[in-house]
Image (cartoon, grey):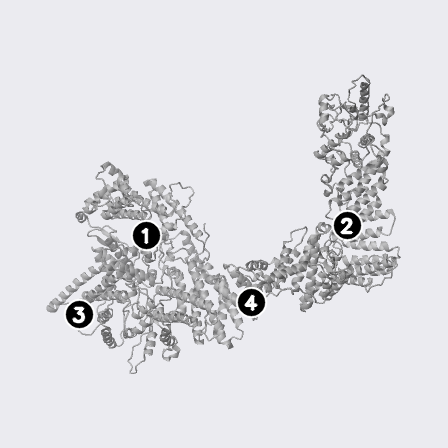
């Protein structure tokens, strides 16, 4: 759906899709209405009323108002030649159908289908209703039936216009036409059924359908009845088979049973018509006045002539008299002054387009009855402002209340609701009882209007003050104008023309007249008031409608005696022609409209005594043209009758009248009517005879014939009248006849001009003899005034005809000639001050009302000077004087046309200044017209239309003037003299006063005091559209007034000492006055653009803040930008902003920057100005960089990455330092030249720095800031503030990298070095530029001091951990290549010596000293200076000590002393803020540093305890602490001082004090308790029970130092744990440190130290394991022995009852190895593991007894020995003894003698074996490590004591938990052997007697085992010892290849060896203690195990 669009807004980018979308929705709504109507129609007669209402609503929908919805004939009638094509519907709706919800497939889906079916079904519905009426009542009145059928025929015609291929509808139309008796329509419809392409004609004739066949037969019969034999012999009738349809088929095919067949056209029998009783035809005028009745008569006659109504022979015409009109009393028809309806008589409504179309349908009459009437109507419409009613159907008028319409309330008060009557009665009672009510209402209204009244008052004061200095008439007072408009009854004759025009516009807008809306909303182009050549020539030649030379005060004819006339017509039997003649006689005959006839020459007629309204004149002209034959014949016969009667009376005296006269009063009236008709025909012909009238030659010829005919008749009548008069003196009627006859000669081309001039001379003599007689014929446009002045004007016109023909010649190509001809006569004519005789009334001119004439030629109202008798002078005037005199009395159209011609000439020579001067003169003429008496005395309705039409013309002129000024503002005013400038300013001020009346009405509507005016026939929001047009006009006038005032300040500089101030105040108050009314953006925002450009150029306004605020308001209204400093300064004027373009954004940069500089940069992102800055930046875009900018960018990038040269650091503080870049002109980089990029970067940087960051976040703002700063530096590298902010941005990037994690610091990230170098380089450039170029303003000095502080911070931070001077070091890639002087060998060397730490501290101290000079009150500068001095002092002291230790002589440099450092700290403490902010912790850094330095000095024996105490007393935190008594008491004192500082640190953020206290306790002492004390101090707040390091970053701690201190404290705590042998905390700390690798600086070193100390603790303190014990034990042990002993040791270690410190050490070492996870080399850990296992092997192994598996193997070995002693085959393979042991329990495996280890356990001595044995394999270190890991695992579960010694693997006992048995994959050879010798089923698992389950590694394997045990809790599983299946299988394979194990021994590792291993004891409350050690567990691969084996 299209978006809502206000009528008062001109959309510049309205898309066609929205319009189409709206039409689709309206089409859908119409379809719904159509379906509803069709539904009701199908329900039958009971729903006919609903169907009629539904069809009415359907035809009132919007789709039927479209231009394309009209019929083709109607479009031609309305648009004429402007209609480009006829197929509007097809082209408009070709996009596709409208998809409707719920509509079936057969429903219409396009607009043509909806229109076609709507008209078709509505016509069908009308016939159905008539048929139903016939069935119910039997008969229908003839007039009603014919009208009903005719309406149905019209509906069918409309439907066929939309779809002419509907054959069924053609047949129905033919049947209806036959019912009406029209042979022509019936035949046409039948032929249309058979109509088709010539190619398909044969096929149609051969195989016709029912419709075609029926139509063909009916057409043949109809043509035969018409006896058209020629048509019967032509196609298609000649080819049709001559077959007849049966009567039954005809009856079935007949669409309407009640109608005849199309071939049986009903004929109206004349005899039946005459036999029928005559009927009375009732005429109902649309408006009850003479014009409305004339319109009804005319329309009835034209409809009768056109065949639209059925003629009724002898019909009588009756007039429908309204019920409220009294016909008994003739005087009741006369409107009184109090009658409210009398005021509305003047408002005559235009006939609708349909009525005008009916008036032009007389095709059989003469040529004047059609085209002439149509042309007259069209020209009348054009004349009244160029705006007719909308082309679509006029919507029904809205219902109005009786009081608003001016009608009296009905009797009994039933005309209004009870609520309204009660409200009125209550209001009446309240007003009667309380007098102050109206005053209170007025006060309330004034309060509502205060904003508007105040704005107008201020504006008028400013403007009037400027006018006074220009000697121009003031604009007046807005209060006076408001009072005048609010109290119309206060208007008197003293009201000037301007105020009268303002009142007229106010009343016109309030009236809601459709003509007013038509004038202002017309889309017709404005011809600038008839200023074209043709209009000027027509005005000069008299073809245009002339006007009365003086104001006509005669009343307008309304409905005088109309009731009596209607009663007389109704009482008699008159035809339509007779009624028309009677109507005409009543209007033209004297005494016809008077209640009491007046006899004698004083009698007046309606033609002479009243003014005719426009529509009355139009209808009367149409009647005398259409009824001309009948009227002429009647008056010709009447004149012959009068002539005969006069002849009889002249012969027979007895038959004379009682008065003795030959003519009766009635006969004299008849003669006057004849004369009047002659004058009216003269009026018609005079206005249609010129070539540009648009009337064809035939019509002109016919009208000329009528004029001659009536001229002859009037001549005969007047001759007869004069012969009957007793005297020869010419009365008024005779003078009119002579005047008309003479002017008839002037329009006769057959009469020579000389004869015409001679006749006019005689006519002039006649009037001169009457002493300046003036006869007003106000209703005749050609001869409105009969006077000597009128004759003089006509004579002057004739004499100057050649001149004006030459001036207005279309072929005139020489503009210079036109200028030389016109300018001398126009300029003096427009400057009456030069002629004293014209000074009295320079602007007083008259005009007559705008009258519609017969030709309806568009022309402007003539304005003429007051008539004065022409006195012949003996002195002959020159032609120039005659011309000036003529122009003084010339009409408005002529004078405007002359100025137009002069303007065109100047345009031809391209001279804009004079063109603008001509435009201004035209405006002066138009405004002066409002002051003329003729305009002031004209009727209200005419004045309303004229004022608005003239304002519309002026609006067009204003637009053209502004365009000229815009194109050439420097020379546009070159031709404006000061006097001309004054008159123009006065004229524009009068125009503004008139337009201001519209503002007053709009104010009342806006506050609700006045209802919104409604305009008949227009949408509801029409008033808003009209006011929008007036707003545009008003703003254009204010703009022109500003330009004129600006020119006035230039031409009169002495009156304006401060012109900028005056111009600014003018623009400001105009903006405010229009803004509070919400139309400052009107006229395409031209005024806002003007104000913006002008105010931007005003730099010398006194009040700069007001100027900036006003400019911000203008920009807010123009672009929607909020550039206000104070948000309250912004006013919402409801303006519609436009898009900000790049060019305009560039112009606003300076102003936006100036406004931004007024706000603190920290607060700027929080204001609306930041949003505005973003909009402006978005509009600027990014210009394509040129080569110079790209080069500068490369230079900057390279410089920021380059190493830091110490020389550059030293030079920058001297102001030395720059980059070699190219110069960028301002025109190339406008944005950068104004500092825009610096502002954008500063905003982004400030936004980032102002955020309270609690965690690591994005750094987009910093990236933006860096990019903007670099763009600014690309333009100029000498901007120190940009360098400074870029350095801060890099510092912020560096801070973000090191504040949240130590990952980049530990990885030695190059990014950190880059940020440090970039920041230092930026600081260097900023310092150098600041020293060179910075001003001495206090704000600048403060910024420079801040620069020094930040620069010093960066240098000092880079020299300390965690950066460690890395930014100053030169990397290998940065070394340069040099060539040796002697050897010429190319070598690589550093380009310069890098900066040392001492030099860095010294340079930083210099920066801090400069910062102190700039800002001595900042404690940080003193504090950091003290730190630098202390570092330098410490460095020198250490260097001296080292030199003394090395025996060298140390030369002490001139470095700082400790006193200087202490003094700086004291200054820092004194500079601390006295009152800290609420919620902020105290600043303790200087206090702690002072105490720390004093303690260090005391420890180093530099000072004694008294001096140290004296130093510490500089801090106020030691006031309550007693000093040390001696040196030994110092520790107590310093700890108390630190405790006091820690007490002040309530949030415990300052961790260094805690660490310092611990060091004081621990340092310089060897006692064990000291370590416990220091440990206790650290574990209070820093190290928790779970060894979580709680070190927080204080507010003033440097970024990155947090991780440094964390590492230091951890190192110190490791030392304390080692001293205190706290193994549990050591383990917790190890896990914490290993997991939190990003929380510690140099984490790898810290971990290495932690492991080293922990291993020492395990080896030396806890386990007492000697070094190298592994090699000593396992060096001489073979693998077999080791395997047996290892199995026993593993079983012992996994026993739950086993406890041994060495075993605990082994387990701790293995756990540390897993925790290490390869972070450091595990050599030391492996050594400890090997040595520990060796100690267990050597000490515990020999004491262990044999395992049950070993005994079982021994028994099996004995059995095998017995079998060996038995006789055997000698061929037995002896190699079985050498086969590797089978791990699957097979008895075929070789049995090794167990007596080697336990000889006493054998039952019999072994037999001698002389077989050669292989060399014993040694034990590898990996095997030792593997066995140690297996032994360190704890058992999985504990078996109850009642468990049997053995347990069947396949069938475990019910009360024993099944153990996890790992199946061992056997080798292929083994599998084959097993397949030959099945495994014994009684294989059992041996369990030690101790009750503990043997480790899975020593469990005998079987082919299948019991399910794995999951009984144990999964939480008992070690987090560090999970194995995956692949590792288990690898270990199994490793065991398989071991061929030296016992037969029943299995040595595979378990799946969960540490299922019940001891868990680390941690604090349950610490959520961070859960270590995911699973991911850190790592095992040795199977390949390594195999290798060792």
CA separation in Å, label 1 and label 2: 96 Å
| Mark in front: 4 vs 2 | 2
Q: Is residue 141 above or below residue 300?
A: above
Sequence-first tag of 3 and 4: 3
Residue 19: x percent and y percent?
43, 52
Mark 4 lies on a secondary structure that is helix
Q: Nearer the viewer, residue 1301 or 894?
A: 1301
User: Circle 4 sits on which residue?
Assistant: 1107
Sequence-first tag of 4 and 2: 4
Residue 1033: x percent and y percent?
43, 64
Point out which mark residue 72 bears.
1
Circle 2 crowding by C-alpha within 10 Å: few under 14, some 14–19, many from 20: many
CA separation in Å, label 4 and label 1: 61 Å
User: Circle 3 sits on which residue?
Assistant: 719
Q: Are marks 1 and 3 in contact (CB under 8 Å)?
A: no
Sequence-first tag of 1 and 3: 1
User: Circle 2 sits on which residue?
Assistant: 1607
Q: Are marks 4 and 2 in contact (CB under 8 Å)?
A: no
Q: Are marks 2 and 3 in contact (CB under 8 Å)?
A: no
Sequence-first tag of 1 and 2: 1
CA separation in Å, label 3 and label 4: 83 Å
């Amino acid at each position: 759906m299209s978006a809502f669009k206000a009528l008062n807004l001109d959309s510049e980018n309205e898309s066609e899709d929205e319009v189409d979308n709206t039409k689709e929705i309206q089409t859908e709504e119409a379809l719904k209405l159509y379906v509803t109507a069709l539904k009701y129609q199908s329900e039958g007669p009971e729903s006919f009323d609903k169907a009629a209402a539904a069809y009415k609503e359907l035809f009132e929908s919007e789709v039927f108002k479209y231009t394309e919805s009209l019929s083709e004939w109607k479009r031609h009638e309305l648009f004429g030649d402007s209609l480009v094509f006829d197929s509007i519907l097809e082209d408009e709706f070709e996009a596709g159908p409208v998809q409707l919800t719920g509509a079936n497939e057969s429903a219409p889906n396009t607009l043509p289908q909806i229109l076609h079916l709507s008209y078709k079904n509505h016509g069908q519905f009308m016939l159905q209703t008539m048929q139903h009426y016939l069935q119910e009542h039997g008969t229908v009145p003839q007039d009603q039936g014919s009208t009903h059928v005719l309406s149905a025929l019209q509906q069918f015609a409309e439907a066929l216009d939309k779809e002419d291929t509907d054959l069924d509808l053609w047949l129905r139309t033919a049947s209806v036409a036959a019912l009406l008796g029209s042979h022509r329509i019936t035949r046409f419809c039948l032929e249309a059924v058979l109509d088709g392409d010539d190619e398909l004609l044969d096929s149609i004739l051969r195989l016709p359908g029912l419709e075609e066949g029926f139509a063909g037969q009916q057409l043949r019969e109809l043509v035969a009845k018409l006896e058209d034999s020629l048509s019967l012999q032509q196609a298609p009738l000649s080819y049709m088979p001559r077959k007849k349809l049966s009567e039954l088929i005809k009856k079935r095919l007949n669409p309407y049973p009640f109608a005849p067949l199309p071939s049986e056209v009903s004929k109206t029998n004349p005899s039946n018509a005459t036999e029928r009783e005559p009927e009375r035809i009732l005429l109902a005028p649309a408006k009850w006045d003479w014009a409305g009745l004339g319109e009804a008569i005319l329309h009835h006659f034209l409809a009768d002539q056109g065949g639209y109504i059925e003629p009724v022979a002898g019909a009588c015409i009756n007039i429908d008299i309204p019920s409220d009109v009294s016909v008994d009393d003739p005087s009741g028809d006369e409107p009184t002054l109090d009658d409210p309806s009398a005021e509305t008589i003047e408002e005559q409504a235009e006939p609708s387009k349909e009525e005008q179309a009916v008036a032009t349908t007389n095709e059989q009459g003469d040529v004047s009855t059609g085209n002439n009437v149509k042309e007259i109507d069209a020209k009348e419409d054009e004349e009244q402002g160029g705006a007719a009613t909308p082309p679509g159907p006029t919507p029904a008028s809205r219902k109005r209340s009786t009081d608003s319409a001016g009608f009296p309330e009905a009797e009994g008060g039933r005309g209004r609701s009870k609520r309204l009557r009660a409200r009125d009665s209550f209001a009446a009672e309240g007003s009667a009882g309380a007098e102050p009510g109206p005053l209170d209402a007025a006060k309330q209204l004034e309060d509502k209007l205060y904003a508007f009244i105040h704005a107008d008052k201020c504006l008028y004061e400013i403007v009037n003050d400027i006018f006074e200095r220009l000697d121009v008439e003031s604009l007046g007072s807005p209060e006076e104008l408001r009072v005048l408009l609010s109290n119309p009854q206060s208007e008197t004759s003293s009201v000037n023309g301007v105020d009268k025009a303002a009142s007229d516009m106010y009343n016109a807008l309030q009236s809601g007249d459709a003509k007013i809306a038509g004038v202002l909303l017309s889309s017709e182009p404005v011809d600038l008031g008839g200023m074209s050549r043709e209009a000027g020539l027509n005005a000069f030649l008299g073809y245009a409608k002339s006007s009365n030379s003086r104001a006509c005060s005669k009343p307008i004819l309304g409905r005088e005696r109309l009731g009596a006339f209607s009663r007389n017509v109704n009482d008699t039997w008159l035809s339509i022609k007779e009624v028309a003649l009677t109507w005409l006689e009543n209007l033209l005959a004297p005494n016809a409209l008077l209640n009491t006839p007046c006899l004698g020459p004083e009698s007046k007629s309606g033609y002479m005594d009243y003014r005719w309204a426009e529509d009355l004149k139009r209808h009367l002209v149409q009647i005398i043209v259409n009824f001309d034959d009948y009227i002429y014949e009647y008056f010709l016969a009447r004149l012959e009758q009068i002539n005969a009667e006069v002849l009889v009376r002249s012969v027979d005296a007895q038959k004379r009248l009682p008065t003795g006269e030959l003519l009766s009063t009635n006969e004299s009236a008849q003669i006057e009517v004849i004369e009047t008709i002659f004058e009216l025909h003269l009026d018609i012909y005079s206005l249609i005879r010129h070539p540009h009238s648009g009337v064809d030659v035939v019509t002109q010829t016919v009208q000329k014939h009528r004029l001659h005919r009536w001229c002859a008749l009037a001549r005969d009548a007047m001759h007869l009248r004069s012969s009957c008069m007793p005297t020869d003196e010419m009365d008024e009627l005779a003078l009119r006849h002579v005047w008309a006859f003479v002017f008839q000669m002037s329009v006769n081309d057959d009469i020579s001009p000389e004869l015409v001039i001679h006749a006019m001379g005689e006519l002039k003599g006649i009037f001169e003899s009457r002493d300046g007689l003036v006869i007003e014929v106000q209703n005749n446009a050609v001869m409105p005034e009969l006077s000597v002045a009128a004759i003089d004007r006509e004579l002057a016109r004739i004499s100057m005809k050649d001149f004006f023909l030459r001036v207005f010649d279309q072929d005139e190509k020489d503009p210079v000639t036109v200028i030389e001809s016109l300018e001398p006569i126009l300029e003096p004519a427009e400057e009456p001050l030069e002629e004293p005789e014209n000074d009295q009334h320079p602007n007083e001119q008259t005009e007559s009302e705008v009258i519609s004439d017969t030709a309806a030629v568009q022309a402007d109202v003539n304005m003429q000077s007051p008539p004065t008798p022409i006195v012949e002078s003996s002195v002959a005037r020159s032609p120039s004087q005659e011309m000036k005199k003529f122009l003084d009395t010339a009409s408005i159209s002529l004078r405007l046309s002359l100025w137009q011609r002069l303007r065109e000439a100047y345009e031809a020579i391209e001279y804009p200044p004079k063109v603008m001067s001509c435009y201004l003169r035209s405006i002066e003429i138009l405004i002066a017209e409002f002051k003329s008496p003729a305009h002031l005395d004209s009727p209200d309705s005419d004045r309303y239309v004229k004022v608005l039409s003239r304002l519309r013309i002026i609006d067009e002129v204003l637009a053209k003037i502004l365009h000229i000024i815009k194109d050439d503002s420097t020379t546009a005013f070159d031709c404006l003299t000061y006097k001309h400038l004054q008159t123009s300013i006065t004229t524009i001020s009068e125009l503004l006063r008139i337009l201001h009346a519209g503002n007053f009405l709009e104010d009342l509507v806006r506050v609700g005091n006045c209802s919104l005016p409604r305009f008949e026939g227009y949408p509801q929001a029409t008033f808003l559209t009209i006011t929008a047009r007036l707003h545009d006009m008003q703003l254009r006038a204010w703009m022109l007034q500003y330009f004129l005032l600006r020119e006035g300040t230039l031409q009169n500089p002495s009156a304006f000492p401060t012109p900028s101030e005056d111009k600014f105040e003018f623009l400001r108050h105009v903006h405010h006055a229009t803004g509070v009314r919400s139309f400052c953006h009107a006229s395409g925002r031209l005024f806002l653009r003007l104000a913006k450009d002008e105010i931007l150029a005003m730099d010398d306004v006194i009040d700069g803040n007001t100027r900036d605020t006003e400019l911000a308001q203008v920009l807010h209204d123009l672009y929607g930008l909020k550039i206000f400093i104070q948000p309250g300064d912004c006013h919402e004027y409801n303006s519609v902003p436009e898009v900000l373009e790049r060019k305009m954004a560039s112009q606003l940069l300076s102003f936006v920057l100036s406004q931004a500089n007024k706000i603190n940069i920290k607060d700027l992102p929080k204001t609306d100005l930041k949003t505005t800055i973003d909009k402006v930046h978005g509009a600027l875009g990014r210009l394509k960089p040129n080569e110079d900018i790209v080069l500068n960018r490369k230079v900057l990038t390279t410089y920021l990455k380059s190493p830091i040269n110490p020389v550059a650091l030293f030079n920058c503080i001297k102001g030395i330092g720059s980059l070699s870049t190219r110069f960028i002109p301002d025109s190339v980089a406008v944005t950068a030249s104004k500092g825009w990029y610096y502002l954008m970067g500063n905003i982004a940087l400030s936004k980032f720095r102002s955020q309270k960051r609690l965690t690591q976040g994005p750094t987009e703002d910093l990236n933006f800031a860096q990019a903007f700063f670099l763009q600014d530096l690309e333009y100029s590298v000498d901007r120190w503030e940009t360098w400074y902010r870029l350095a801060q941005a890099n510092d912020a990037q560096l801070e973000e990298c090191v504040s949240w994690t130590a990952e980049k610091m530990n990885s030695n990230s190059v990014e950190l070095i880059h940020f440090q170098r970039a920041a230092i380089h930026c600081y260097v450039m900023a310092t150098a530029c600041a020293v060179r170029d910075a001003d001495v303003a206090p704000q600048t000095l403060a910024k420079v001091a801040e620069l020094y502080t930040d620069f010093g911070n960066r240098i000092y931070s880079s020299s300390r951990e965690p950066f460690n001077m890395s930014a100053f070091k030169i990397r290998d890639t940065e070394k340069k290549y040099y060539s040796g002087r002697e050897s010429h060998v190319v070598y690589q060397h550093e380009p310069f010596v890098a900066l040392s730490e001492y030099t860095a501290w010294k340079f930083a101290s210099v920066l801090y000293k400069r910062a102190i000079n700039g800002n001595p009150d900042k404690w940080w500068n003193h504090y950091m200076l003290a730190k630098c001095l202390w570092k330098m002092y410490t460095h020198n002291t250490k260097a001296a000590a080292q030199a003394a230790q090395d025996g060298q002589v140390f030369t002490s440099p001139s470095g700082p002393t400790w006193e200087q450092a202490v003094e700086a700290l004291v200054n820092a403490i004194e500079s601390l803020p006295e009152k800290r902010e609420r919620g902020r912790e105290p600043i303790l850094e200087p206090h702690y540093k002072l105490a720390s330095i004093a303690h260090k000095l005391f420890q180093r024996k530099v000072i004694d305890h008294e001096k140290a105490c004296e130093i510490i007393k500089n801090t106020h935190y030691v006031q309550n602490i007693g000093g040390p008594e001696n040196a030994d008491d110092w520790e107590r004192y310093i700890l108390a001082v630190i405790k006091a500082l820690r007490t002040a640190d309530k949030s415990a953020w300052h961790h260094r004090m805690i660490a310092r206290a611990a060091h004081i306790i621990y340092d310089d002492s060897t006692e064990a308790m000291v370590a416990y004390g220091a440990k206790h101090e650290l574990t209070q707040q820093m190290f928790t029970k779970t060894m979580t390091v709680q070190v927080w970053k204080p507010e003033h701690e440097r970024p990155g130092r947090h991780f440094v201190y964390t590492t230091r404290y951890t190192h110190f705590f490791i030392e304390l744990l080692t001293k205190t042998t706290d193994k549990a905390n050591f383990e917790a700390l190890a896990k914490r440190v290993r997991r939190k690798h990003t929380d510690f600086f140099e984490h790898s070193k810290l971990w290495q130290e932690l492991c080293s100390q922990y291993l020492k603790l395990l080896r030396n303190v806890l386990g007492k394991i000697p070094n190298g014990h592994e090699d000593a034990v396992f060096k001489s042990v073979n693998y077999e022995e080791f395997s047996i002993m290892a199995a026993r040791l593993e079983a012992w270690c996994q026993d739950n009852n086993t406890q041994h410190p060495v075993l605990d050490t082994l387990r701790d070492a293995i756990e540390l190895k897993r925790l290490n996870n390869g972070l450091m080399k595990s050599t030391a850990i492996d050594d400890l593991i090997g040595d520990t296992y060796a100690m267990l092997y050597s000490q515990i192994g020999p004491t262990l007894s044999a395992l049950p598996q070993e005994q079982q193997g021994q028994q099996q070995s004995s059995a095998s020995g017995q079998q060996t002693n038995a006789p055997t085959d000698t061929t037995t393979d002896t190699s079985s003894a050498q086969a590797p042991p089978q791990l699957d329990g097979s008895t075929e495996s070789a049995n090794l003698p167990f007596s080697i280890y336990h000889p006493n356990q054998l039952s019999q001595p072994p037999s001698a074996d002389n077989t050669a044995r292989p060399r014993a394999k040694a034990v590898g270190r990996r095997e030792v490590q593997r066995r140690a890991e297996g032994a360190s695992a704890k058992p999985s579960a504990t078996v109850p004591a009642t468990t049997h010694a053995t347990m069947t693997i396949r069938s475990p006992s019910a009360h024993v938990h099944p153990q996890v048995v790992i199946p061992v994959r056997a080798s292929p050879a083994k599998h084959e052997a097993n397949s030959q010798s099945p495994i014994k089923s009684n294989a059992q698992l041996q369990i030690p007697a101790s009750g503990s389950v043997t480790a899975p590694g020593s469990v005998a394997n079987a082919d299948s085992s019991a399910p794995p045990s999951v009984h144990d809790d999964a939480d008992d599983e070690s987090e560090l010892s999970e194995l995956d299946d692949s590792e288990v299988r690898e270990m199994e394979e490793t065991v398989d290849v071991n061929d030296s194990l016992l037969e029943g021994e299995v040595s595979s590792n378990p799946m969960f060896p540490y299922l019940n291993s001891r868990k680390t004891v941690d604090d349950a409350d610490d959520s961070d203690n859960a270590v995911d050690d699973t991911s850190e567990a790592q095992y040795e691969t199977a390949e390594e195990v195999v290798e060792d084996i």
